[in-house]
Amino acid sequence: MSYQVLARKYRPRSFETLVGQEHVVRALTHALEQQRLHHAYLFTGTRGVGKTTLSRILAKSLNCQGPDGNGGITAQPCGVCDACVAIDAGRFVDYIEMDAASNRGVDEMAQLLEQAVYAPSNARFKVYMIDEVHMLTNHAFNSMLKTLEEPPEHVKFILATTDPQKIPVTVLSRCLQFNLKQMPPGHIISHLDNILGQENIEFEAPALRLLAQGAHGSMRDALSLTDQAIAYAAGKVTLEAVQGMLGALDQSYLIRVLDALAVQDGAGLLAVADEMATRSLSYNAALQDLATLLHQIALAQTVPAALAEDLPQREDIVRLASQFSAEEAQLFYQIVVHGRNELGLAPDEYAGFSMTLLRMLAFRPVAANAAAAGSTPAPAVRPQAAAPSRPNPAVAPLSAAPQVATASTPVARPAAAAPAASAGPANSARAAALEAARAASGKSSPRPAVQAPAPAPAPAVAASAPAPSAVPAALDERAPPPWDEEPAAAAAQKKTEQYSAGNAVANAAPSAPIVIAADEAIVVAAPASTVTPAMAAQTAKVAAELGWDGNWPQLAADLSLRGMVAQMAQQSELVRCEQSGNSVIFHLRIPVETLRASGNIEKLTAVLGERFNRSVRVETEIGAVALTANARAQADRAERQREAEQTMHNDPFVQVMMREFDASIVPGSIRPL
């Protein structure tokens, strides 16, 4: 007697023995028990999940005659009557299985429909099972629409396909559609365990898990691989044999990779990659298995009960789960998945695989690196609260002579906020000096604006942080990062204070440096204006001759400029304006060097000459600015924002809502018109 493969020998012959499709079995069983039968069924799903098996069981249920020959439609076919035996043997004349891949034309479909009108010869129903129905042509589909919608009472259609997207909607709407799921590995393992037990074949549980993974959700593929493994191992299914048969990667390589990663051993990582290259192992499969291993490590960290007891590497997984944090496992998993997707873009597979390993090494969190090195990890701090990494006069005690921050002097980062009692000597002195300056100002504001007398050893504390125009954006390292959101109201108030601070800086004496306190950091800025009364009078005189009011911010905003030259004009401050022969010289202070590059000065000179119809020359210097078009625009926007918020808060309806319904205004939701 010839050998029958396991996939055919153990094909389910009833709904009770069908594995993994409980949702479909439940619907069909209830329909058969209640005699609510449809005329067309559509089974969809990947290969080997039971589409043809379901159609045969359904055909037996429709035509079963019972052991005594008096049975009717049932959800539990007997399997011993003539109809059941014939359908199982594939020779039942009224059960027609048609392959749509080889009978896909309109002529074949017309022939089938012509035969459908005749009554069954020896059955209750004539059942047409059309496999891979998506292979039919459009004309064939159209020719069967009418019969599919209203077939004769004795005809049932069962359609099966692996690609339902290719079936016309007109056909789908005429069928009851059932989507068959891929088999979970657990279902496949238990089914293989049962079959091998009946076959009296010795096996190892890890080998069955590897076969289930190789089947990718197909029960038929799992049974075919089991047949192959039995032949490969001479009648015994072992893990070593299955690994050799499937060409599966030895998991010890991946365990070594993670062990080297845990101790930050880059040489060990590359040694594993080189050894895999020597044995010509698949790097794509290695990354796939490494992602699976990291997934199991994450399970062991968060849901230990979900980790299967029969995993071959369970002990190593539990050990590695204790060596990596949950964040590291997630990060490594993401790097491995992306590395596998980018493997085809790499110069070669070795480079792609080794680069993925080095990327995991390079992007390991800093705290983990410190722990691996045996040191105590430094506490994470926000970027805007980091302590300065270089000596800076801004964080020195205020009793020392402050240095002036110019274009060549770096601006201090704000120090992390901490109580004065726990701070170092410099911070304690700074805090004490701040309190003394605030007390001397006589104001309750935490950042009062007081101009410091020139002979005093401790400069005064300005009202707030300098405006963006007072300290160049390229030098202002105290600016918060873009991910720190600030409520609109606070931002508007801050901009108003900044513009006021700019005016205070502009009116300061040339010899008096300005100390600005912002967010618990001390920043020493150069005086924003060194205009003497003589310079101001000279500028006013020249402006009167030009027919101009001397308001440079308004003039810069009104000039027809675009791009970088417009930015230079609007971010610059007029120091003085003087007459030199027939020419007018505009002396401008610009915050950053970049703005006066690429011919911007020449373009501004041409526009000013056209504006005043005079010969104009523009001279520039680099320094902190305050009275600019940008600063005035920011102050105007802040004032409009303040007025809009005040109007909203004073609205009677809003006040009633806030008082009676405990309503509140969402910060940042008010915008001026």
Image: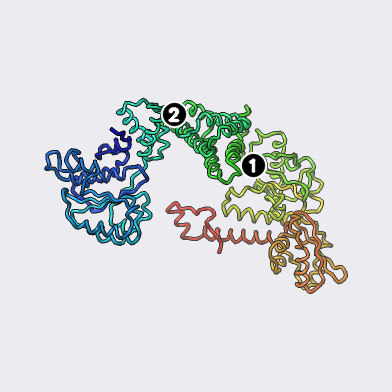
Q: Residues within 10 Å of mark 1 (few under 14, many from 20)?
A: some
Q: Nearer the viewer, mark 1 or mark 2?
A: 2
Residue depicted at x 47% and y 25%: 315
Which badge, 1 or 2, comes first in the chain's sequence?
2
User: Farthest right residue?
Assistant: 581
Q: Name the kind of residue labelled 2 in the image.
A: Ala
Residue at x-position 53% and y-position 53%: 667
Percent from the top left, x then y, of residue 277? 58, 34
Quarter of the figure with the C terminus: bottom right
Residue 247, image x, y percentages: 48, 34
Report the number of numbered marks: 2
Q: For residue 187, which quarter of the picture?
A: top left
- Residue 385's label in the rendered image is 1
Against 242, is 617 above or below? below
Identify the image quadrant of the N terminus: top left
Q: Residue at x 74, y 60 (%)?
A: 572
The vertical placement of 642 against 360, above or below, is below
Could you tell whether 629 is left or right of 256 in the image? Answer: right
Viewer can see residue 190: yes
The one nearer the camera, 639 or 127, is 127
Residue 604 coordinates in the image, percent (x, y): 76, 66
Q: Is residue 364 visible?
A: no
Q: Nearer the viewer, residue 661 or 617?
A: 617
Q: Say whether marks 1 and 2 touch (CB < 8 Å).
A: no
Q: Amino acid at mark 1?
A: Ala
In three-dimensional space, the C-alpha distance between marks 1 and 2, rounded to whole angstroms, equals 59 Å
The quarter of the displayed image where residue 623 is located = bottom right
Mark 2 secondary-structure assignment: helix
Q: Residues within 10 Å of mark 2 (few under 14, many from 20)?
A: some
Q: At numbered mark 1, what does the secondary structure look like: helix, strand or loop?
A: helix
* Disc 2: which residue: 241
